[in-house]
Amino acid sequence: LQEENLTLDEVEAVRLADLEKFDQEASSRKMNVSRVTFLRIIHSAHHKISKALIYGKALSLRGGEYVMPNIDGRGPLGRPARGKRGQGLGDSTDCVCPKCGEKAPHQRGVPCFNTKCPKCSTPMAGVFCRQ
């Protein structure tokens, strides 16, 4: 079965826009990215999801570490966690600035997009989701 790989940034963008019904401005603020960057992320996610639906591909999540939103390990819909709790399918040791290339160590449990570049204050990206 072929796969379409979604980054955790793309999953978060879909959650904010499609499930939580935040507008572009609020979603981009919550992700700490510009509206243009948010639109790029959400369009990429929608394209991948559409290809998976139309062509019968599996969706997989790649990159980073995450924490389930409920303390007891249940997900946002109240369902039990699947697989290893708090582990993504990829790994990143560094966050990288997409603007200037500066690297900073990745902090466990903190998405790279929540980390500002120490040189230019641009939100950083995980090595696994750079394109």
Image (tube, rainbow, N blue to C red):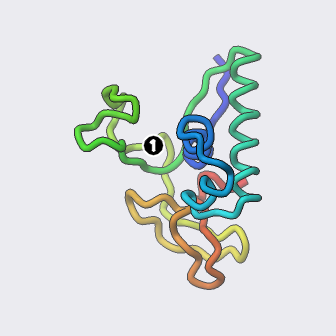
Q: What residue is rendered at 58% in x and 74% in y?
A: 103
Label 1: how many residues lie within 10 Å, few (<14), some (14-19) or many (20+)? Answer: some
Q: Is residue 47 above or below residue 90?
A: above
Q: Which residue is mark 1?
A: 88
Q: Is residue 61 above or below residue 63?
A: above
Q: Amino acid at mark 1?
A: Gly
Left or right: 37 in relation to 11: right
Left or right: 15 in relation to 24: left
Q: Using the image as rendered, state which of residue 96 and residue 19 is in the foreground.
A: 19
Image position, residue 63 (x, y; %): 53, 47
Q: Is residue 129 above or below residue 87?
A: below
Q: Is residue 6 above or below residue 9?
A: above
For the question of whether residue 105 can be seen, the reply is yes
Q: What residue is rendered at 31% in x and 27% in y?
A: 80
For the question of whether residue 7 can be seen, the reply is no
Count of numbered circles on the image: 1
Q: Spot the residue most to the bottom.
A: 119
